[in-house]
C-alpha cells in the first residue's frame, strides 16, 4: 500500500509536468521501477501508459477549450501519430534501439542549444503554413515522432512541441496544446499493443490515472495562466533533465 501511495504521488507530479510541456515519464517511470523492482519492464511501461494516457487526454481537452486548435491539421496528424507509434512498437520487436539510445542525448542537446540561441523562438503564435501544407507537415511530424515513441519514447512530448514551434510557427502554448493531442494518440497505440499482451496492471493504473488527471489539471491551469513564456521555460528545464537522464542511461549506467 505504501508503494502505491508513493507512485500515486509521483503520478500526480508527472501529470502536472506532462500537461505543461511533456516529460512526465521522467518522473513516473523511474518511480514505478523503483517501487516494483521485480516486475517485468514491459508491465511497468504498460502500467505507465495505462495511467498517463488519461492525464494527457484530459490536458488535451482542457487546452482545446481555451486555445484555438488547428483541428483540420491536428486530427489527421493524430491519426498519423497513432499509426506511427504502433509501427514503432512493432519494429521494437525486431530491432534494438541501442544506437538511438546513444544518439538521443546529442539530439536533445542540439534542440536545447537552438532554443536557447533563439530567444524569440515560440514566444509569438505566427503559423507559417495553412491548408494542405500545414496538414502535410503536421502529419509528417506525427508519423515520425509517433514511430519514435513506439520504438523508444523518451522526450516524445518535447519533440512534438519543438517541431510545432520550429516548423509550423506555433508559440509554445499552442505547440504544447497540439502536442497533447498527438501524444494521446501515440500513448493509445502503445497501450493497445501492451495491453493485448497482458502488460498492464490495471488495478495500479486506475489509481495512478486519477492522480495523473489531478496533476494534469494543475499543470494545464498553470500553462494557460502564465502563457507561452512560462511553457518555454518549462520546456528548457524538461529538455535539460532529459539530456541528463538519457546521457546517464546511455553512457554511465
Image (cartoon, helix red, strand yellow):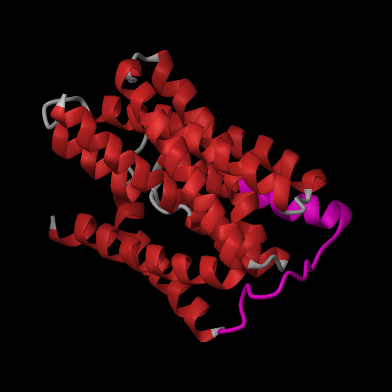
**Part of the protein shown in magenta:** 119-142
Q: Quadrant of the N terminus?
A: top left
Q: Quadrant of the C terminus?
A: bottom left
- Left or right side of 33 for 96: right
Quadrant of the rendered structure where residue 134 is? bottom right
Quadrant of the rendered structure where residue 236 is? bottom left
* Residue at (41, 29) in percent of width and height: 209
* Residue at (38, 35) in percent of width and height: 211
Q: Would you place residue 189 above or below residue 108 in this image?
A: above
Residue 183 seen in render? yes
- Left or right side of 167 for 193: left
Question: What x and y, as percent, mark residue 10?
Answer: 28, 42
Is 133 magenta? The answer is yes
Is 90 magenta? The answer is no
Question: What x and y, as percent, mark residue 17?
Answer: 42, 53
Residue closest to the eye, 127 or 83 = 127
Residue 163 seen in render? no
* Residue at (56, 84) in percent of width and height: 119
Q: Would you place residue 89 above or below residue 162 in this image?
A: above
Amino acid at each position: 500500500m505504501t508503494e502505491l501511495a508513493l507512485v500515486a504521488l509521483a503520478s500526480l507530479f508527472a501529470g502536472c509536468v506532462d500537461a505543461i510541456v511533456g516529460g512526465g515519464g521522467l518522473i513516473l517511470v523511474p518511480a514505478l521501477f523503483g517501487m516494483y523492482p521485480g516486475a517485468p519492464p514491459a508491465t511497468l511501461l504498460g502500467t505507465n501508459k495505462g495511467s498517463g494516457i488519461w492525464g494527457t487526454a484530459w490536458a488535451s481537452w482542457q487546452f482545446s477549450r481555451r486555445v484555438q486548435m488547428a483541428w483540420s491539421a491536428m486530427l489527421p496528424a493524430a491519426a498519423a501519430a497513432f499509426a506511427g507509434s504502433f509501427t514503432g512498437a512493432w519494429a521494437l520487436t525486431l530491432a534494438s534501439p541501442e544506437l538511438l539510445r546513444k544518439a538521443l542525448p546529442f539530439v536533445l542537446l542540439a534542440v536545447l542549444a537552438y532554443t536557447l540561441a533563439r530567444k524569440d523562438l515560440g514566444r509569438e503564435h505566427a503559423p507559417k503554413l495553412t491548408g494542405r501544407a500545414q496538414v502535410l507537415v503536421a502529419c509528417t511530424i506525427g508519423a515520425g515522432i509517433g514511430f519514435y515513441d513506439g520504438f523508444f519514447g523518451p522526450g516524445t512530448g518535447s519533440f512534438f512541441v519543438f517541431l510545432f514551434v520550429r516548423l509550423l510557427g506555433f508559440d509554445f502554448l499552442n505547440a504544447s496544446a497540439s502536442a497533447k493531442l498527438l501524444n494521446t494518440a501515440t500513448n493509445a497505440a502503445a497501450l493497445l499493443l501492451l495491453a493485448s499482451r497482458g502488460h498492464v496492471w490495471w488495478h495500479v493504473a486506475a489509481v495512478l490515472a486519477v492522480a495523473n488527471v489531478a496533476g494534469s489539471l494543475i499543470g494545464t491551469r498553470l500553462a494557460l495562466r502564465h502563457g507561452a513564456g512560462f511553457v518555454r521555460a518549462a520546456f528548457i528545464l524538461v529538455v535539460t533533465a532529459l539530456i541528463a537522464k538519457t546521457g546517464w542511461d546511455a553512457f554511465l549506467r
